[in-house]
Image (cartoon, rainbow, N blue to C red):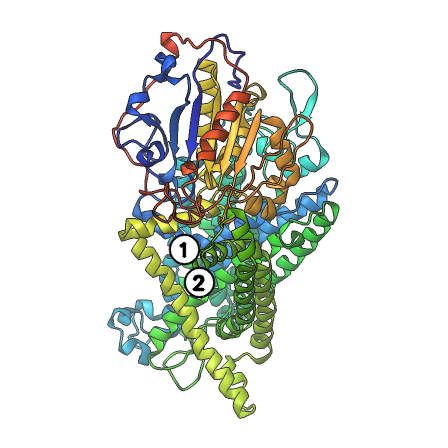
Amino acid sequence: MSPATPVPQSGGPALELLVHGVGGATPQDMLGDPRTVRLSGDEKAAVFRRTDDEEAERHPERYADRPIPEAYCWSNLTSGNGARALWLLLLPFMVVNLAHWMRPRAKGRARTTRLYGVLVRLVALSLTVLLTAAACEVALDLLAWQCAGSADCTRERSWLGSLSSAQGGWWSQPGRRLALAAVVPAALVGLLWYLSNRTWSAYESQRPPTGEDVGEGEEDPDEDADELEDKGEDKGEDKGGTKPTVRPALGRPGFWYGRRLVARLRAAHTAAGFLTVSAAVAGAAARHDRRAAGTALEICGLLLEAALVVALLAVLWVVIRRGRSERRIDARIDRAAVRYLPGAALALLVLSLLYASWSRPGWVSSATLPGDVTFRVIALIQGGLVVSLAVAARVLHRRARHPRTAMSGFGGPAVAMLACALGGVMTGGVAQRVADWLDGPGTPGMDGEGSIPGPPVLLSWQASVIPVLLIVLFVPAVVLAVRTWLKARRLAGPVEADYDEGRPDAVRTRRIAGTRARAALTDAAPWIVGIVSGATLLLGAGAVAGAWASGEVPGKAFGHSDGFVESAAEAAQSIGSWLIGFGFILFVTWGRRAYRDASARRTIGILWDVGTFWPRAAHPFAPPCYAERAVPDLTWRMCTWTGLTGGRLVISGHSQGSVLAAAAVWQLPAATRRRVALLTYGSPLERLYGRWFPAYFGPVALRELRSEVHCWRNLWRRTDPIGGPVLVPAEGEHPAVDRDALKDPVVYGRSERHPLPEPILGHSEYQADKAFDRERRELLDRLTPAVPRQVQADTHVQVHGQGQGQAQGSSGRSSG
């Protein structure tokens, strides 16, 4: 049942619940005291107080002029132990999951909204197939088929001796080599399933305190939550009366509890991975058997391929059939999909391995593994899905235009395209590096230069367009640099006017103006992303066309052209092959460094703080959503504290912490929301989230939040590259949310009170500004006054775990 806060019967002190931003923070830094005690929580996320404030509720008279400070530390949800450095390899999955949440806000387009979600889930499924196909390319094609089938290649690699066709052993037959090598990609798929299942239990299984539970056997309409929002059917009862209200998306009881969809998608993607391995193994054997017509093996191959097609259709049905259900806490599991689909796919994989292992004495592996066309088909499907996604996004955006929406609603398709590009770089980089290693001094794909044919032709074409893409991006980079420089010069006058200095310092002015101009680069991100994604789409289409038309790598396809064209093609192929391999090595290097170096792990954790705020709605193998743990934590804390003490509460969020704070306030019962104040600073709520995720943090949603919370104030600086105003104007009895921009630095130059130059703080140290204490005090004064502060003995906060000086992750102030 909902733990809505009852009408207070007794007064109590005020509480300030601090939530840090990305990069992590220790409770000691947040509370400004080396002596802290953990009130509630575990090693991943917990609530802390100063040791002196542990029994604050027993002594309300000590806090008549100040709130009780309390820190919620969630650092270890994203930047804890070294194993999380491996999440870098899941970057494409995380990026495509973001595309799901970037859809434009539109009413009355239920079918288009549902189509948008289906298309993103299909793009995500294609990335799983692409990753598995890349693992098959390395293990099955390059190693088991090409290298083990070449005497020159195995001669220098004794560990492949038992698989060599020249040895004539039991494993020398191509089918048996493929069956043995299939263990590698199958193990990769199993590892992804295990990580997704384990992280769900550790991060995302926390139930919010609002809404109603759904029993395992209850029926639920087969409709997406997004579709229900468009129909206006997501209704709840207002606690103050009987009038039904339509809750915003982030206020729905089941928004932060996506167990059902994640389980369905995990089963489907696991099955898709096993089916990809099965198709690679069984397909090669079936093609050989068809050349020897009339055999029983040919019939077995046809039946096995038909079963694989049926299983693939079942996977597509599971992915397409159902989206997120957010109206209530949906704790059910679709048992048929979750239990039987991965098991059936695994059974087909075992049958494929047995089928390929059957003795075929006359079978010899030559050239590349049959099925080279697979990567071309995947690239075409991804391109078609992205274009279709762009059409759907355009239709939705036309119904709810807003000038601040990033890329006019095309943010989701652009990010989906970047996810496909990242997947291509990572998979192509693995194949190119392994091929270079096996081929010795030869260039992959160039006959006569090595001992093996090399990876699929398309991968070489995709690598070749990378230098072209870098040249294309050089022009907007120069334009952006020049524009920033010119803007810094134009800002010199406004900077001096802000401080009204009689004798301005040109060097100091240039530094402040330059910081403001560079901070504004964040607002240029949409058109940079648009250029990158558009160029990637066009160059990728050209690569597919070139590979399909020529069937050869660029160096050979242009071998009979003009001398300059031929040289340019060979240079692009060699440089691109090096760059794509270097990109993959860079990923591995970062992962290894993050595993061993805590500071590097915190830096990588910042990426996840931004990218994994959203639930896994499109890809189940993406890094886990920490907000599905953090938002219920904050909601439970606010509900229980106000319910026990009847006191006032201000939740104070910096940077990403402000996004968590807003999401938690949305989840509060109405009676509690009316007694909570929201203080945000350095907040990306509108500047990043409102522009890129308009359906959830757009102008309509932020105005709704202002009307629901008792009072809200936002602090920002012009030198902040992340935070900014939320642009919610005054309306009726509600004042404007944004305060005038804080001065940064606080003092222009040296003075008697400030003999040393003040630093330019940018995104950090908002609490050091005097305006912070003033705004917090005004928020508390605007809350409903509490009756005389006196609490019973049984209302003080219980301590569930103590640990003086227990840090939750990285040291230092929040950096984002």
| Crowd around label 1: few <14 · some 14–19 · many ≥20 (10 Å) | some
Mark carried by residue 645: none
Q: Position of residue 340 (x, y in %)?
A: 50, 42
Q: Is residue 135 visible?
A: yes
Is there a contact, CB below 8 Å, between mark 2 and mark 1?
yes
Counting labels gives: 2
Quick one: 529 or 455, which is closer to the camera? 529
- In the rendered image, which residue does mark 2 sit on? 426
| Relative vertical location of residue 364 with respect to residue 406 in this rendering, above or below | below
Q: Is residue 632 visible?
A: no
Quick one: 782 or 753, which is closer to the camera? 753
| Left or right of 206 in this view: 302 | right
Q: Position of residue 595 (x, y in %)?
A: 29, 52
Residue that appears at 48% across and 58% down: 514
Q: CA distance from mark 2 to mark 1?
A: 8 Å
Residue type at numbered disc 2? Met
Q: Position of residue 424 (x, y in %)?
A: 49, 64
| Left or right of 537 in this view: 31 | left
The part of the image, by quadrant, that contains residue 251 is top right
Quick one: 302 or 745, which is closer to the camera? 745
Residue type at numbered disc 1? Leu
Residue that appears at 54% across and 39% down: 261
Question: Element at badge 1?
Answer: helix
Quick one: 401 or 380, which is closer to the camera? 401
Q: Position of residue 40 (x, y in %)?
A: 35, 25
The part of the image, by quadrant, that contains residue 105 is top right
Counting residues from the start of the chain, the first of labels 2 and 1 encountered is: 1
- In the rendered image, which residue does mark 1 sit on? 89
| Crowd around label 2: few <14 · some 14–19 · many ≥20 (10 Å) | many
Question: Element at badge 2?
Answer: helix
